Image (spheres, rainbow, N blue to C red):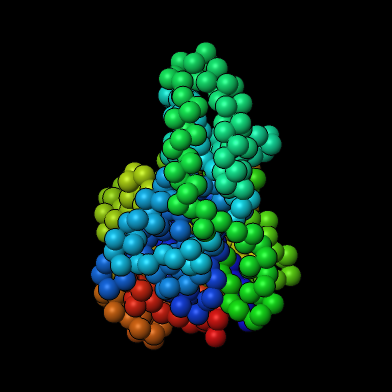
Amino acid sequence: MANVVIVGTQWGDEGKGKIVDLLAEHAHLVVRFQGGNNAGHTMVVGGEQFICHLIPSGILQDKTCIIGNGVVVDPAVLLEEIDNLQSRGIHIAADRLLISERAHLIMPYHKSVDHAREQFKGDKKIGTTGRGIGPAYEDKATRRGIRFVDLLDPKVFAEKVKTLLDEKNFYLKNYLSADVLDPQEIIDQYRQHAQRLAPHVANVSIIINDAIKNGQHVMFEGAQGTHLDIDHGTYPFVTSSNTVAGNACCGAGVGPKQIDEVIGIVKAYTTRVGAGPFPSELFDDVGDEIQKVGAEFGATTGRRRRCGWLDTVILRNAVRLNGLTGLAITKLDVLDGLESVKICTGYEYRGEIIQDFPASLDVLAECQPVYENLPGWKEDISSAKVIEDLPPNARNYLDRIAELTETEPHIVSVGPDRDQTIVLKHPYR
């Protein structure tokens, strides 16, 4: 038995979907524990691309997939995702996709507030996806959220919507100068969602813990990345949930002693979508080339990702915050053909070298990356099956990452397809 948490170590978009899809073959349950449909996990199987925003990536491996209580769920998006997967031959029975009865709903007013706030802020906006994630977590924290257990009770649901919408409409109209919403339209729309989703709703904490007791393998799938964590990330340019591994327990309903491995997904370089500090960002032809070759566009938003060299300051931070037991390095093949590759090993701040990631955005703005240059490799590594197939300079690059982070690579991805992966240490074997 092994229970494994998969987390991103950078600012999201590290390739978690592929790694979860790969490892899910050996898991019995795959559990999403935080975030919402502001995350997109991309998987490529036999050259065919699948993108999931809410449904755990293990769905392609015919596993039981669970949306935990720590996730905020837009039911319309979830149903669209179910319909899309089923139209492509992925059958999703009620017992194959389970939703926590304690998971909170994203409501139409959450999305309206999200959009209106960003427009209101103008140049000071933080780059939210506009999908209502933050406002939904906001209502959850102030004890005004609506959960799936409420959705399944028509009377309770209608009362909550009417009460809440009085306040939301006042805020939308009088402060944000936005359109108000009709409560009955929302009630009618969500009753239809409830009819379809009711068979999937359950007390998933019991199901997960029973599986662990019975010796089954469980995988906990995180969304976004460590440095988008609301407590530990580049606040306020963060998401609205805790993305670190510790939240797998809170967001799924299991105790910490149940976790055996924590695998951190790290891209062989660094990317970021939207606003926020990015010390190793590149503004030259190399950055443009990495962006082009890596097809660096957000799976959810389609926005162009900012690209830069691998930053081991943030990677070491992620190792500590998550208690990583191993790394999965993705998109190594994107660096093929470069004369040299660089690794950021520290930051220079006012004449001093700092090794730890600062909390202050003003300090970060003054930080200059300190680079270590390594020779690149000209070979195409996309067909490599074992570590010995990689050119020496590529192996040296991996070795240096391990040295700087004191964490060994367990998986190396050399292409987008499931088969383009070198597994050095399998958490389920």
Taking the view exactly as shown, the residue that stands out farthest to the front is 155
Point out the image quarter for the N terminus.
bottom right
Q: Where is residue 41 in the image (x, y as percent from the top left)?
A: 41, 58
Q: Which residue is drawn at 33% across and 62% down?
A: 86
Given residues 341 and 398, the one toward you in this image is 398
Q: Where is residue 338 in the image (x, y as percent from the top left)?
A: 30, 64
Q: Position of residue 308 (x, y in %)?
A: 40, 52
Point out the image quarter for the C terminus.
bottom right
Taking the view exactly as shown, the residue that stands out farthest to the top is 174
Q: Is residue 174 visible?
A: yes
The vertical placement of 39 against 423, above or below, is: above
Residue 254 placement, left or right of 108: right
Q: Which residue is drawn at 35% across and 83% down?
A: 385
The vertical placement of 227 against 393, above or below, is: above
Q: Can residue 113 be seen in this view?
A: no
Q: Position of residue 285 (x, y in %)?
A: 27, 50
Q: Which residue is drawn at 51% across and 58% down?
A: 199
Given residues 414 and 404, the one toward you in this image is 414
Q: Which residue is drawn at 73% across and 65% down?
A: 255
Given residues 253 and 356, the one toward you in this image is 253
